[in-house]
Amino acid sequence: MSYNDTFMRRAIEISAQALDEPGLEPFGAVVVRDGEIVGEGINRSLANFDPTSHGETEAIRDAARNLQTVDLRGCDLYTSCEPCALCVAAMAIAGISRLYYAADMAQAGAALGHLPESARFPIDVAHLTHECAHPVAERRMPSEQARAAEAAAILQRWAEQAMRPRSGDAREG
């Protein structure tokens, strides 16, 4: 599928809701499959006290619920602003096939960079990108591994169970 201005206009329209509704931030997104919007989202981080409630993640959640799947391969995502690393990771996990974005990070930074800390949720995009691009031992956030064998055994047992079909299981089909 190629770019469709109708979907980008909708993503920007959704982002504009933040102008009138307290607790929203101006980042809107839509997920499109087969020429139809299947999910919409706006940044509700402040309203929901949820730092992962970005427009893209909300649109992905909405699309997954509407389609009753976690596999969004074949879907495109249109967003009012270039996604951060969190949203890029969510798109990759969901299988989003193509991204279309309006404002880029530099434009967002120029528009929002003058806000006081109290008026915005501070995301250091460069730091986030660094953290996501490095193995856990090379990240700035201190980390420590514990009880690895116990957790890995549960993962293994779950994987074995997932391989056995169960009647009424949502994974069937």
Image (spheres, rainbow, N blue to C red):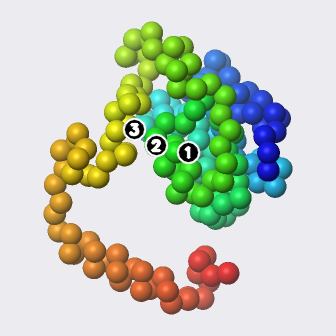
> 109 or 58, which lies in front?
109
Position of the C terminus, as image quadrant, is bottom right
Residue for point 65% across, 18% down: 20
Return the disc, 1 or 3, that comes first in the chain's sequence: 1
- Horizontal and vertical percent position of residue 130: 34, 39
Amino acid type indicated by mark 1: Thr
Which disc, if any, is residue 86?
A: 2
Residue 118 higher or lower than 167, as above or below: above
Residue for point 52% across, 45% down: 88
- Horizontal and vertical percent position of residue 118: 38, 16
Q: Can see residue 63?
A: no
- Horizontal and vertical percent position of residue 143: 19, 50
What is the distance, in whole Å, between disc 1 and disc 3 at their CAs?
17 Å
**Disc 2 packing (10 Å; few <14; some 14–19; many ≥20):** some
Amino acid type indicated by mark 3: Thr
**Closer to viewer: mark 1 or mark 3:** 3
Return the disc, 2 or 3, that comes first in the chain's sequence: 2
Q: Report which residue position mark 1 lands on.
A: 57
